[in-house]
Image (cartoon, helix red, strand yellow):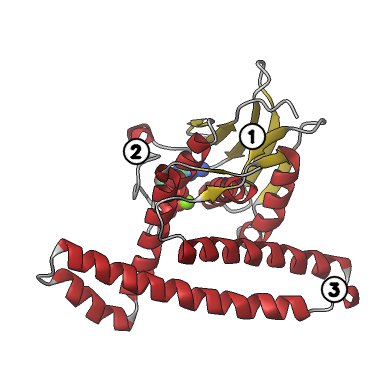
């Protein structure tokens, strides 16, 4: 079953993606000219129009690039690969398809509403896939990615694409925060009242006390090349699912928890 969200999720997604694209754009050489125009005496309305046109163009280009990548991925004959390479290609295909879906909804989605398809999903499957997705990033830092899945299925009703965005953000942050040879653990289960949850834990330095209040604010980042949009977007997505995104942790590491409403199945 699918239903329509109110405008706020679209707001989070579009605002964030638009900002990202705008930032990427203003960083290119051609972007210098763009920046001059943006900083000049344009009215807010003109500037807005200019930005949306520019973003439309970037989305269009990205869709073309992704279509090429997906096309070549499809051409790979998985039967000829050894199992490890086959898994890598399958994971790359899934990630590329997610990107295509996001870009498609962006290019159609200049409307005020976004449809979000909630369906029963198992948090155990979700974290297994998140682990596959995060492996290349973890490998670079020799970070161990561990799973502690609940022995039973943990069914929730959610939009799988959006929930994958949340987990990806949390896991990427955890890998960033973990030291070389550190560890990140994903865990699934149910709370005492039956609410499904998942946690992402790392052994970094956690969030400093003075930063805790800013964690979920847009553009809050302590990273040199950070956007500060991952947690902001994730918070909005989890809230749209009537769930909660919580931070607990200490100087010995961060713990982020997603709690979702119980789903009878
Ligand atoms: N696992 C974590 N450990 C320590 N700090 C974290 C962790 N996750 C997020 N943060 C803090 O929250 C900030 C915002 O995160 P996020 O919204 O994902 O943006 P970004 O990753 O681009 O900085 C990070 O810059 C970092 O300071
Ligand atoms: Mg992040």
**Which residue is painted at 68% across and 20% down in the image?**
194
Near-viewer residue (113 or 46): 113
Place of residue 44 in the rendered image (x, y in percent of width and height, measured from the top left) = 17, 62
Q: How many marks?
A: 3
**Kind of element beneath mark 3:** helix
Mark on residue 27?
none
**Kind of element beneath mark 1:** strand
**Which residue is painted at 62% across and 81% down in the image?**
68
**Which residue is painted at 82% across and 68% down in the image?**
86
Near-viewer residue (156 or 132): 156
Q: Is mark 2 within 8 Å of ligand 1?
A: yes
Q: Is mark 3 within 8 Å of ligand 2?
A: no
In the displayed structure, would residue 150 be above or below residue 34? above
Mark 3 vs mark 2: in front: 3
Q: Is residue 77 left or right of residue 258?
A: right
Place of residue 108 in the rendered image (x, y in percent of width and height, measured from the top left) = 48, 64
Which of the image's four quarters has the N terminus? top right
- Mark 3–mark 2 distance (CA, rounded to whole Å): 45 Å
- Mark 1–mark 3 distance (CA, rounded to whole Å): 32 Å
User: What residue does disc 1 label?
Assistant: 198
């Amino acid at each position: 079953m699918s239903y329509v969200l109110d405008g706020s999720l679209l707001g989070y997604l579009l605002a964030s993606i638009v900002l990202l694209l705008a930032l990427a754009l203003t960083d290119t050489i051609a972007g210098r000219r763009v920046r001059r125009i943006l900083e000049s005496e344009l009215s807010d309305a003109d500037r807005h129009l200019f930005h949306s046109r520019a973003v439309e163009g970037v989305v269009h280009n990205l869709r073309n690039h992704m279509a090429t990548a997906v096309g070549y991925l499809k051409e790979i004959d998985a039967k000829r690969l050894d199992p490890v390479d086959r898994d890598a290609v399958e994971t790359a295909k899934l990630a590329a398809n997610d990107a295509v879906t996001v870009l498609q909804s962006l290019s159609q989605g200049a409307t005020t509403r976004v449809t979000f398809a909630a369906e029963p999903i198992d948090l155990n499957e979700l974290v297994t896939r998140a682990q596959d997705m995060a492996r290349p990033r973890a490998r670079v830092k020799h970070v161990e990615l561990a799973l502690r899945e609940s022995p039973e299925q943990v069914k929730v009703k959610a939009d799988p694409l959006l929930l994958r965005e949340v987990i990806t953000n949390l896991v990427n942050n955890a890998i960033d925060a973990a030291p070389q040879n550190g560890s990140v653990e994903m865990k699934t289960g149910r709370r005492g009242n039956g609410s499904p949850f998942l946690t992402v834990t790392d052994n970094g330095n956690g969030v400093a006390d003075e930063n805790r209040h800013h964690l979920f604010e847009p553009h809050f980042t302590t990273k040199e090349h950070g956007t500060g949009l991952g947690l902001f977007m994730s918070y909005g997505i989890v809230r749209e699912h009537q769930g909660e995104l919580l931070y607990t942790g200490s100087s010995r590491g961060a713990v982020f928890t997603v709690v979702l409403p119980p789903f009878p199945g």
